[in-house]
Image (spheres, rainbow, N blue to C red):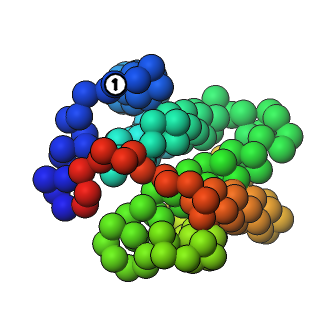
Amino acid sequence: MIPALYANLKRPPRTVVEWLADAVRAAAIVIVIVSLFTLPFTDFAVLSMSLPAVMLSRMIGLRSGLDLVTCVTVFVAAGSNVIDLYRAWTGWDLVVHAVCTGVLAAIALVLLDDARVVAPSGRRRTSVVVATMAGLALSAVWEMVEWFGYRFITDAIFVTYDDTIGDMIAGGAGALAIGIVASRFRLTRADRAAL
């Protein structure tokens, strides 16, 4: 598995979209490093949580368009927290939860398929069910992280019951949407190194 992840990571970009995804990935890495020295530690921590997703989308060989959307989405999600867009723009939180959970559910779907935990490519409805379950699970974990941060780190984190449930519904909807997409289209590049 590790050799395949490395092979996908070191594969040179071949299309404009692949170059754009790598540019976003590089910008994310630079911004996180700079934020370590220029922003409060909590903002650095929030931004750095986006790095596993932006790297993993390349390492598992997501299709170039989905890779780009993943990189942009997770970094916008983290950055929106740092510059306080979730409080400034009504509804932005739900949009980001839907899209971000959708792309993370796509990553989970590919990883689960590669690990032979499930075989989404076998039946159309399997992708829909597994992606939705993965998205709801990821949403629940994220809401626990938010609660933990509010309870033990800073009360500046906005946590209410309605917000939590709304975020989980939006995340589940985004994951359901990616499950439908995955039931009809391949999520990974045809030439990726198989895990």
Q: Is residue 93 left or right of residue 182?
A: right
Name the outermost residue toward the left.
3
What is the x, y in percent for residue 170? Answer: 75, 59
* Residue 174 or residue 52, whichever sits in front: 174
Q: Is residue 6 left or right of residue 156?
A: left
Which quadrant holds the N terminus? bottom left
Q: Is residue 130 above or below residue 25?
A: below
Residue 163's image quarter?
A: bottom right
Kindly identify the amino acid type of the residue bearing the numbered disc 1.
Arg
Q: Secondary structure at mark 1?
A: loop
Q: Is residue 161 left or right of residue 53?
A: right
Q: Is residue 152 above or below residue 32?
A: below
What is the x, y in percent for residue 161? Answer: 79, 68
Residue at point 48%, 69% (across, down):
121
* Residue 150 or residue 128, whichever sits in front: 128
What is the x, y in percent for residue 131? Answer: 58, 68
Residue 32's image quarter?
A: top left
Residue at point 38%, 79% (across, down):
117
The residue identified by callout 1 is 14
What is the x, y in percent for residue 108? Answer: 46, 63
Q: Are there few (<14), some (14-19), or many (20+) residues within 10 Å of tag 1?
A: few
Residue at point 18%, 46% (across, down):
6
Residue at point 86%, 40% (across, down):
90
